[in-house]
Amino acid sequence: MLDGESIPLPSCRVSSLNLGWGLDAQSCDDDDPIEISERGMFMRSRWHFEIGTRLAVSFVSEPDRPGARRLTAEGIVVWCERCKSDPCGFESTVLFLELPDELKQSLRELSYRLATARG
């Protein structure tokens, strides 16, 4: 599912993650490790998920910039462990379910921008 217009993301930073269709949200710092591909994502968050939990995950890119949009994908948690460096946080891997081609392309673009920004 793709929310917003079909335009390139203006930023190489994910500013927030939203779960459960926006019922819970978390701002992302520049150093938050978020890895995204068209198949899934790795994230660090304050949430602990049971393996098999089905999620709707939205990525918001710089909401204060013109043309910003939200990408929303559904997935299943396949791994979740407490962070060693942050006792209040968890690291999770989410495998995306079947996605439309347009959303896959948008996730590829976001993944490329994030990787390029990290150097």
Image (tube, helix red, strand yellow):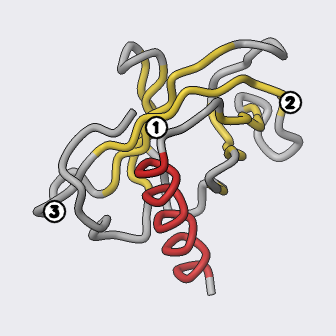
> x%, y% of residue 29?
49, 55
Circles 2, 1 touching at the beta carbon (< 8 Å): no
Whether residue 57 sits left or right of residue 68 in the image: it is: right
Q: Earlier in the sequence, mark 2 or mark 1?
A: 1
Instruction: Residue 79: give its label.
Output: 2
**Looking at the image, which residue sits at the far left?**
66
Tell which of 37 and 62 is nearer to you. Answer: 37
Residue 78, compared with residue 100, is above or below; it is above
Amino acid type assigned to the residue bearing label 1 in the image: Leu
C-alpha span from label 2 to label 3 = 33 Å
Q: Earlier in the sequence, mark 2 or mark 3?
A: 3
> x%, y% of residue 8?
29, 67
Tell which of 38 and 52 is nearer to you. Answer: 38
Please name the residue that numbered disc 3 is placed on.
65
Whether residue 49 sits left or right of residue 8 in the image: it is: right
C-alpha span from label 1 to label 3 = 17 Å
Instruction: Residue 28: give its label.
Output: none
| Element under disc 1 | strand
